[in-house]
Amino acid sequence: MLKMATIHDVAKLAGISRTTVSRVLNCHPYVAEEKKRKILNAMKQLDYVPNSSAQRLRKTKTDTIAVFVPRITNPFFSHLVEVMENEAAKFGYKLILCQTHYNKEQEKKFLELLKTKQVDGVILTSIENEWRHFKPYMSDGPIVICNEYDDDAYVPSVYLDQVKGGYLGTKHLIDRGYKRIAYCAGSERRSRLTRDRRKGYEQAMKEASLVIDEDWYLYNAISIEDGKNMFQRLKQLKNRPEAIFTGSDEVAAGLLKAAKDSGWRVPQDLAIIGFDNQPLAQLLGLSTVAQPIEKMGSQTMKVMIQAITGEESKDLTNLSFHLIHRTTT
Amino acid sequence: MLKMATIHDVAKLAGISRTTVSRVLNCHPYVAEEKKRKILNAMKQLDYVPNSSAQRLRKTKTDTIAVFVPRITNPFFSHLVEVMENEAAKFGYKLILCQTHYNKEQEKKFLELLKTKQVDGVILTSIENEWRHFKPYMSDGPIVICNEYDDDAYVPSVYLDQVKGGYLGTKHLIDRGYKRIAYCAGSERRSRLTRDRRKGYEQAMKEASLVIDEDWYLYNAISIEDGKNMFQRLKQLKNRPEAIFTGSDEVAAGLLKAAKDSGWRVPQDLAIIGFDNQPLAQLLGLSTVAQPIEKMGSQTMKVMIQAITGEESKDLTNLSFHLIHRTTT
DNA sequence: TTGTAAGCGTTATCAT
DNA sequence: ATGATAACGCTTACAA
C-alpha cells in the first residue's frame, strides 16, 4: 500500500496553492484557465485522486446510502435493490447493503451507521422495530420507507395501497368462481402492509357475500418451504378451501409444488394466486398480483436523494398493482 | 441535523483529556477503572458516538468492502452476496454493492472506490476487464476473486475446478444414456470459467467416444429469456441433440419452459441439466450441478479480511460440486 | 497511567 | 482570481 499523492503534492508540483487545487476539484468558478490546465496536468502526472475520507470529514457528506432488506436472496428485495443501486449510481451514490434477517437487533445495529455518519441516509424496505426506536436517528439523516409503511412514521414513504392489492387478488379468485378462499401471508405482527392486504381480502369476500372460515387465515409464511408446509396444514382442514390467496410468489410456488407432489390438480383441486410476479411465477404459470417494483425502487431513491440534498420532495406518481392471470386460477 | 457531541465534549464533561477518551474508545490497556467509568458515563450522557469519517481519515481504514457482481437479481450472485454480507457483519465490516451489468466501464468506475479509499478491499465475483486494468489498483488494497478466475491475476482466489463441473454434468447425461449432447453457456469471451466448463464437457464426451457437432455449442445465454431463445435455435438444428448441458439453472428453466410450451416432453424429447441448484431448480424438478455457494462466500470473505488485516492466508478448504438428479434427465 | 501536540487530507473563511 | 490559515474529529508518538 504505497503512499498516495495528496492535494499538497499537486499544489507543489503545479506551483499553486492547495486552495486553488481544491477549487478545480470542486468545479468552483474563478480559476484561471491556465492554472487550471497546470493543475489538471499535475494531477494526471501524480495519478492523484482525492482522499474521500478527508472529504467526508470536511463536508460531512458520505455519498453513501444504507438500504435495509430482510434478505437479499428474496427476489422481491433483490429486484428492489438492483433498481435502487442503478439509480443511486447515476447520481454518484454508493449503497451499503444491510440484511436484517427479520431481526430487531440487527436492524438497530445497522441504524448506527446513520449516527456514526457512515451514510447520508437510510432506506427501509422492511420494518422490524416499532417506530419509536427509529426516532432518535431521525436527526442524523433522512430515513425513507419503501414498500412497508408505519402509521407513526412521519417520513417520506413510497408504497402501494395494499388494501387494493389484497382486494385485487381476492376479487380475481372470486371472479373465477371460487367461493371458499383462504388467506395466507407473512407475519401479522405490527406490519401494516400485511394487515392492509388482509383488509382487502376481507373486503372482497364481504362484497361477494362470502363467509370466511377462521381456519383459513394462515400466517408466518414467507419462503418456498413455508408454502410447502402450509399445504400440509391446508390438507387437514375440515372445511377445505378451494382457492388460496398468498402474499408472495414463493409461498405460492411451495404450495403449488406440494400440491402437485400430492397428486392434486391446480387449479381444479386448489386454485393458487401469488404476489409480486417474480420470474418464477412466469415459469410456473402462477397467477399473481404484480407490483411496479422498478418504479418503487427508482422513486424511492429519488426521494432519498432529494431529502439528502434538501430539495423539496415532489408528489409521488401513482403506483398501482395489476393482475396477471396464468394457469393456477 | 443537530451538531453531535465530539470526543472533545466528552473529555470536557468528564474532566479528562481527549487522549484518554480515545483510549477507552479503542480499548487500550492502562486506563484507570475510575476514569474509564467517568468517561463511559459522559459518553452516555452526551449520547456520544465516534465520527467514523474522522476515524477513517486517521486510521486509513474504512471497515468497508466492495463486492462486484454482474446483477444482484441473479440468484447465484444474490446468494453469494447474502453469505458474504453475513460473514462481513460478523467482523464489523460493511458491504458496498457494485453491479457491473457485465460492463467494462462500470467495473472500472467502481474500482475507483479502492483508490479513493472508500473501501479496504474489493471482491470480484465476475471479471469484465482484462487483468492489466486491475493491476494499477492492487497497491490500493487487496483484491480477492471469487467464483471466476484469471490466469494473469496473482491474487487470492476462491473457486471451483470448473472442468470438473462441466465433466460432472455431462457425465451424468451420458450415464443416463444420452449420446447427442449439446453445450450451452454464458459468454466465451475471456472467461476462463466458461472455457474450463467446456473442457469438462469435451472431456466427458471424448471419454465416452461421443462425437460433438459444432452446432451444439450455444453461447451467450445467461437469463431465462435466453434459455427460451436457445430452444428456438435448438429446434431448428438438422442434427438435433437429445440432451443439453447448460451453465445456469435460469437458462435451463427457460429452455424447459419453452420446450414444454412447444409440447415437448422432458426428458423424453429433450433432457436438460442446469447449474447452481437454485431454489427454482428444485421447484421445477430440474437436474443440476450444485455448487457450494455458502462455503465459497464465507471462505472468500475470510480470505479478504485476512488480506486486509495482513494475516497469512490459510490454505483453502476443498470445495467441490455435486450432482443433483431430478426429473429433467 | 495520563496529557500535550502534531497530524491525517480536505475545504471554508477571510483576506488581498 | 488566489492564497494563508483554521477547522473537521480523531489517533498516536512522545513526554511526563
Image (cartoon, coloured by chain):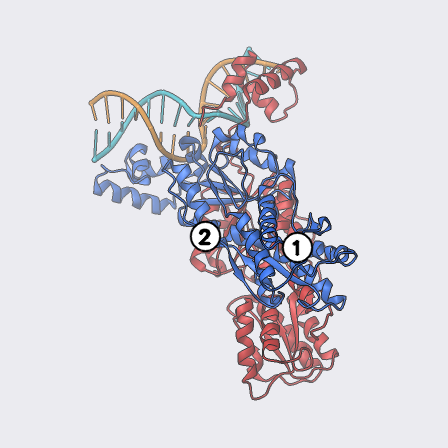
Chain colours: A blue, B red, C orange, D cyan
The answer, for residue B308, to whether it is visible in the render is yes
Splitting the image into 4 quarters, where does residue A104 fall? top right
Residue A85: % across, % down: 48, 50
Splitting the image into 4 quarters, where does residue A43 fall? top left
Q: The residue under label 2 is which amino acid type?
A: Lys
Above or below for A226 versus A60: below
Above or below for A306 versus A265: above
Q: Chain of mark 2?
A: A
Q: CA distance from mark 1 to mark 2?
A: 34 Å
The answer, for residue B76, to whether it is visible in the render is no
The residue lying at 70 percent from left, 71 percent from top is: B168
How many discs appear? 2
Residue A247: % across, % down: 62, 53
Residue situated furthest front in the rendering: A209
Splitting the image into 4 quarters, where does residue B91 fall? top right
Q: Are marks 1 and 2 on the same chain?
A: no
Q: Chain of mark 1?
A: B
Give the numbered dot on residue A194: none
Say which of B178 and A286 sits in front.
A286
The residue lying at 55 percent from left, 73 percent from top is: B228
Q: Secondary structure at mark 1?
A: helix
Q: Secondary structure at mark 2?
A: helix
Depth check, mark 1 against mark 2: the one in front is 2
Residue B212: % across, % down: 62, 83
Residue A203: % across, % down: 58, 49
Above or below for A298 versus B130: above
According to the image, label 1 marks what residue? B296
Considering the image in quadrants, where does the C terminus of chain B appear?
Answer: bottom right
Q: The residue under label 1 is which amino acid type?
A: Met
According to the image, label 2 marks what residue? A295
